[in-house]
Image (cartoon, rainbow, N blue to C red):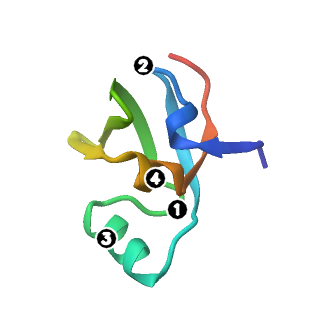
Amino acid sequence: MQPTTNLLSLQNGHSGRIAAIDGDRQMVRRMLSLGLRIGTTINVLNHRGKSIVIQNAGTRVALGQGVAEKLQVETLEHQ
């Protein structure tokens, strides 16, 4: 298992795999409804201030700072 970091730490253009969701049941349900679950590979498209725009299987999702900090990701090789 690779070391994890929160989603906000990934740079634009980098990819990661969700390793953990540090939140309550409602937070986990919300992430599932957006297609974000443990094991999902995401690509960082853009940081907009303290929020972040990611892509998951062709779908773009904007997340605020509070949510992004609760998503722990394993960094994947930059492609």
Q: Mark 4, residues whose alpha carbon is within 10 Å: few (<14), some, or many (≥20)?
A: some
User: Quick one: which residue is furthest to the bottom in this view?
Assistant: 25
Q: Secondary structure at mark 2?
A: loop
Q: Which residue is mark 1?
A: 38
Mark whose residue sits in front, 4 or 2: 2
Q: Residue at x 25, y 43 (%)?
A: 62
Q: Residue at x 35, y 36 (%)?
A: 52
Is the Cβ of the residue at disc 3 closer than 8 Å to that at disc 2? no
Q: Secondary structure at mark 3?
A: helix
Q: Locate residue 28: give its quadrant.
A: bottom left
Q: Earlier in the sequence, mark 1 or mark 2?
A: 2
Q: Which residue is mark 3?
A: 30
Q: Which residue is mark 4?
A: 40
Q: Residue at x 40, y 72 (%)?
A: 27
Q: Which residue is mark 2?
A: 13
Is the Cβ of the residue at disc 4 closer than 8 Å to that at disc 2? no
Q: Mark 2, residues whose alpha carbon is within 10 Å: few (<14), some, or many (≥20)?
A: few
